[in-house]
Image (cartoon, grey):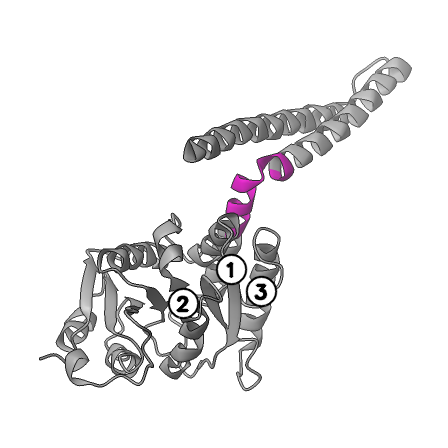
Amino acid sequence: MSELDKKPTNRKKGANTLVVACIPAYNEEENIAKVIVETMEYVDKIVVCDNGSSDLTAKIAEKLGALVVKHKKNMGYGAALATLFEKARDIGADVVVTIDADYQHDPRDIPKLIEPIINKEADLVIGSRFLEESNSIPLYRRFGIKIITALTKRASYRGITDAQSGFRAYSKRAIQMLTPGEYGMGVSTEILIQAKERGFRIKEVPIKVSYSKASKRNPLYHGLIVVTSTIKQISIRHPLLSYGVPGFVALVVAAVFWIWTLRLFAVRGRVVTNVALIAIGATMVGLILLTTAMILWVLISLLRRSKNV
């Protein structure tokens, strides 16, 4: 009998409600046991995605009774979530909780996350680090998360405070309909955009977070990856705004410089190279952006229409 079977749960179970914790993990042999043991108090099953670890992460998780799915190599946080969602669907999860394997999140907050799902109040619940006053969040993290959240709000939910929190709860409907394609950390933003498009109800609850250990990720690199991923997601969904408007502006600038070029030619009898080059460059940029906008708009319209057929 595994530890998961032996240990009683502190969760007040709903009728026939299967709550599954999904844990993406990469080289977390120091923390995975503690996360699993404390998490099992509040859920029915635990699924760990060993994302190409080279240490004992998978063996420890299996020893404690967690269901472990493995990637041969580290495919990224988003790929791990996609695998976990697929496994959760396979075992018929009614509620899914995603929690980090580095013990940054407090498993005792799980009941707060799953309650709105069980009570049919939300399809997606985010554990927000900024709604808990006792959290001491490093300044660089706070600044980065605020920027990313501000960008995400433009394409998803206006009222969210923490778009990058990995501590979340999902309803069965959400797990069945969400199809993340981002392999990296940008998946958190992509999920929120997809949730908005599908009309999911969302709620935030305060959670405690610990930054006692240094992050394995370079904060600057991580931030740039997430920001570029967020911009990509927004541009794909709104190509006319993201590419068409800048393209139109570029052509207006080109027109101004073409007029200037012609006037200088009329006065001096020669072409001023610098002004002409700007006119040519702005014309090329404008045409490329407008063409890109139209192509993406047509493709996205066809994809949306095919999904509705």
The residue tagged 3 is: 160
Question: Is 239 included in the stretch rendered in magenta?
Answer: yes
Which residues fall within the magenta stretch? 230-242
Q: Residue at x 22, y 65 (%)?
A: 53
Question: Is 64 included in the stretch rendered in magenta?
Answer: no
Amino acid type indicated by mark 2 = Ala
Q: Secondary structure at mark 3?
A: loop
Amino acid type indicated by mark 3 = Ile
In this picture, residue 192 sits left or right of residue 42:
right
The numbered dot on residue 201 is 1
Q: Quadrant of residue 217?
A: bottom left
In this picture, residue 260 sits left or right of residue 108:
right
Q: Nearer the viewer, residue 180 or 112?
A: 112
Seen in the picture, residue 110 relative to 295 is either above or below; the reply is below
The residue tagged 2 is: 169
In this picture, residue 82 sits left or right of residue 67:
right
Q: Nearer the viewer, residue 111 or 13?
A: 13
Quadrant assignment for the N terminus: bottom left
Residue 77 at x, y percent in the picture: 35, 59
The numbered dot on residue 3 is none
Q: Residue at x 70, y 30 (%)?
A: 248
Seen in the picture, residue 127 relative to 252 is either above or below; the reply is below
Asked if one can make out residue 154 in the rendered structure from this viewpoint, the answer is: yes
Please tell me whether mark 2 or mark 3 is closer to you in this view. 2
Please tell me whether mark 3 or mark 1 is closer to you in this view. 1
Q: Secondary structure at mark 2?
A: strand
Q: Nearer the viewer, residue 152 or 43?
A: 43
Q: Earlier in the sequence, mark 1 or mark 2?
A: 2
Dominant secondary structure of the residues highlighted in magenta in the image = helix
